Amino acid sequence: MTVTSPFALEIGLGVLVLLVFLATLFARGDDRRAIGWLATIGVLVVLAGSFLVAPASTVPPALGGMFVLDGLAIFAKRLFLIATFIGLLAGLSSTDPVFARRSGEYHLLVLTSLLGMCVLASARDLILLFLAFELMSIPLYVLSGFVKRDAIAVEAALKFFLVGSVSSAVMAYGLSFVYGAAGTTSLAGVAKAFAAGSPLLVLGLLAAFAGFAFKIAAFPFHMWVPDTYEAASTPFVAWLSVAPKAAGFVALFRVYYEGAGERVVAWIPIAAGLATITMLAGNLMALPQQNTKRLLAYSGIAQIGYMLVGFAAASASGTAMVLFYLVAYVFGNMGAFLVVDAVARFEGSESTAAFRGLAQRSPLLALSMLLFLLSLGGIPFVAGFWAKLYVFWAAAAAGLYWLVLVGAILTVVALFYYLVIAKRMYIEAPERAARIRVAPTLAIALLLCVLGVVVLGVYPKPLVMAALRVATPLF
């Protein structure tokens, strides 16, 4: 059976949001974690349904061309759903009474943000794109300060909200220039106007680019990342660190590839420069970190820089390799955060010192963390190795040899702080001998991440070919 409606996944998520809302209204008692199971299973059902969605050739654009269900949109939506399922599954075992009592609110906000991401992936109109961005972003501001009794979480949420609001204002201001110069909000119309070389249009796209850079946490628009990651609940941070970033990159592809048309090469110097400073700043700021979540936050900024290397290539292969990188990043980065969550629940600390002797106490947990760190560091043969290799390959094919050299050098720098955690796990003696117990749902989420990292590392070809099929029509 094939689903031909372009809004099938959005309708499915909308129904799930309504069910979670009704369950929240009629729930009794202080423990409402059953709502979490409803949301998690619902996301899994929608994910399964995404493989029944008809290809773009049989589903024409909707809303007058504003909404399209092409290969890129389907690929991105499946990625969002996988990341959300892993994040919700890991969060089911949270021991914080706030998440038991307010489970309905938490999952309603997550699903609403997910709905915004799915709409964003299909948006081919500037107005719809901006609205989808806000639908995705506003719930994230609330979720980052969900534990209101924690003053640090509230401060981090406020910082996230203020910086996010400014970035949205800058993006809206830039998009208004684009509309003024192009006379349309359609990306096809913007591409025609861009070919004419309007200075006002270029100015508008540059301003909008700053807003996009905030969404993907590129330097110097990263200010909210370390504090938010440290203060918010770890399963949410694991999801926050990957899904909104993937949505931001899909929007970049839409606006700066489809919206630039034949003059797409005009963005190469800007993207290459942003990639360089993002890789450099992220890796250098990660070096002195002692809190593991802050270390992974700065590591994530550096990872965005590597993805921007593929974006700077401005080619079908570069776009495809960024998509592959995003999938590898979902499994590697979420897995690392979930190991931090497992250790922090038992040790009561998120510092790197809490990992001392982990290999002696919980060898499988330590091995999982090692695989995730090796993937993030780009060591053969796990998923992250192919991700970095492919984006560098695409950049070299575009003649950006200097950018590849910078990225390769900074990859070596990144290995230092990843291996610091590995040293603590495998070389340093444990402070106590008690085995770390991992909740069943968290263990399943970790297993999914391990499988993703290992399988993509051993056999990346199917996903690479799928990403190439998705990316080629953009050019």
Image (tube, rainbow, N blue to C red):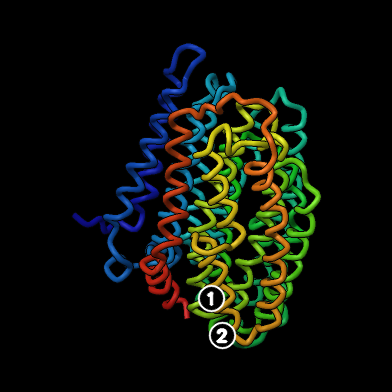
* Relative side of 403 to 63, left or right: right
Give the mark, 1 or 2, whose residue is nearer the N terminus: 1
- Mark 2, other Cα within 10 Å: few <14 / some 14–19 / many ≥20: some
> Residue at left 64%, top 36%?
357
Residue at the disc numbered 1: 318
Q: Residue furthest left?
A: 1
Amino acid type shown at disc 2:
Ala
> Residue 385 placed where, x, y %?
54, 65
Can residue 109 be seen by looking at this rendering? yes
> Residue 256 placed where, x, y %?
59, 73
> Residue at left 66%, top 83%?
401
Count of numbered circles in the view: 2
Q: Residue furthest top?
A: 29
Relative to 357, is 289 above or below?
Answer: below
* Relative side of 290 to 449, left or right: right
Numbered disc in front, either 1 or 2: 2
> Residue 292 placed where, x, y %?
69, 42
> Residue at left 75%, top 61%?
219
Picture quadrant where residue 206 is located: bottom right
Q: Quadrant of the image for the N terminus?
A: bottom left
Tag 1 and tag 2, C-beta contact below 8 Å: yes
**Element at badge 1?**
helix
Residue at the disc numbered 2: 397
Viewer-nearest residue: 402 or 144? 402
Relative to 246, is 64 above or below?
Answer: below
Amino acid type shown at disc 1:
Gly
> Residue 432 placed where, x, y %?
66, 25
* Relative side of 427 to 327, left or right: right
Residue 472's disc is none
Relative to 312, is 61 above or below?
Answer: above
**Element at badge 2?**
helix
> Residue at left 70%, top 60%?
414
